[in-house]
Image (cartoon, rainbow, N blue to C red):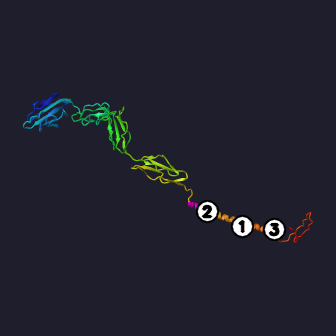
Amino acid sequence: MCGGELSEPAGVVLSPDWPQSYSPSQDCVWGLHVQEEKRILLQVEILNVREGDMLTLFDGDGPSARVLAQLRGPQPRRRLLSSGPDLTLQFQAPPGPPNPGLGQGFVLHFKEVPRNDTCPELPPPEWGWRTASHGDLIRGTVLTYQCEPGYELLGSDILTCQWDLSWSAAPPACQKIMTCADPGEITNGHRTTSDAGFPVGSHVQYRCLPGYSLEGAAVLTCYSRDTGTPKWSDRVPKCALKYEPCLNPGVPENGYQTLYKHHYQAGESLRFFCYEGFELIGEVTITCVPGHPSQWTSQPPLCKVTQTTDPSRQLEGGNLALAILLPLGLVIVLGCGVYVYYTKLQGKSLFGFSGSHSYSPITVESDFSNPLYEAGDTREYEVSI
């Protein structure tokens, strides 16, 4: 049947000669009509027409209405919705020799549906939620789906209300996550895994290449959590280049060092101190710099005797003492000379024999009959030996 008027609540439109292939030179028009307060939902079940043939859908009564869709060649199943109670279908196949195996035709189902401007309501997924771009599910409304921590979304996370008031995809679902994310490889090393996909309970072991040392946990384990996604037991380790340690540079004479040990790893520091009475000459702290071999940033310091007085100040002090003591000594020497001189003068006046003096004669009773002598008398004696 090529064309016709259909005023039923539901029905089907078949291509000419269905289920046989249609013949060329076709120009068929169908008019679909439902109740005034309804509109038409058209379901394309099968569409396989020859190249150059076309099925046109008009949103209204007659080919002068707005074009709803133009369908060519093989098409997947799809749904179309009219804006009112009328829908017009036109199938055109130009003249030409038949092509066996092609041009099977089409099967279209239609039915009347309530006239509204919203897509069907969709409930939020279990263990998740959805957000809508509009309060009403009108054409163009976008639904965005998300899952709670520990769950992953199965299906499309975005649905759009299409022009025919159908959703662009089936609503998704939230499923509990039972795997850990890939922890990744490490530079200058390699890993081995116990299970593909990293399910809960699986292990990942890391090893470093020769010349490198592992910093961190060598084995990571995937474990589940009551809330949230499964998690690895530790951070991914790193492979660090091995460095030879620095040897202890020794303790300075009259000094000491902190954290005394024979070897120091790259990056470690050593601090020096001097005993009381000595001052430190050089760097107080030296650090082991990584290398092959590792080296200290500088030579260890020295401890020298502390100079309490500046030599220039000593000279100034000596000059000051000399300036004070020299005059004092001169005064003392001069005083002593004056005292001696004065003493000599006093002695001459007390013991000198010049001048006249009056003496009283001294009478002494003695066994000797010696006469009295006046001062100035002489007497000669004879002594026998």
Residue at image mark 3: 351
Q: Magenta stretch: residue 319 in it?
A: yes
Part of the protein shown in magenta: 311-320
Quadrant of the rendering where the C terminus is positioned: bottom right
Tell me whether circle 1 and circle 2 mark residues in contact (CB < 8 Å): no
Tell me whether circle 2 and circle 3 mark residues in contact (CB < 8 Å): no
Distance Cα–Cα, label 1 vs label 3: 22 Å
Q: Magenta stretch: residue 111 in it?
A: no
Residue at image mark 2: 320
Residue at image mark 1: 337
Of the numbered discs 2 and 3, the one sitting upstream in the chain is 2
**In the picture shown, does residue 314 fall above or below 9?**
below
Q: Determine the main secondary structure of the stretch shown in magenta.
A: helix
**In the picture shown, does residue 335 fall above or below 234?**
below
Q: Secondary structure at mark 3?
A: helix
Please state which amino acid type lies under the numbered disc 2: Leu
Q: Secondary structure at mark 2?
A: helix
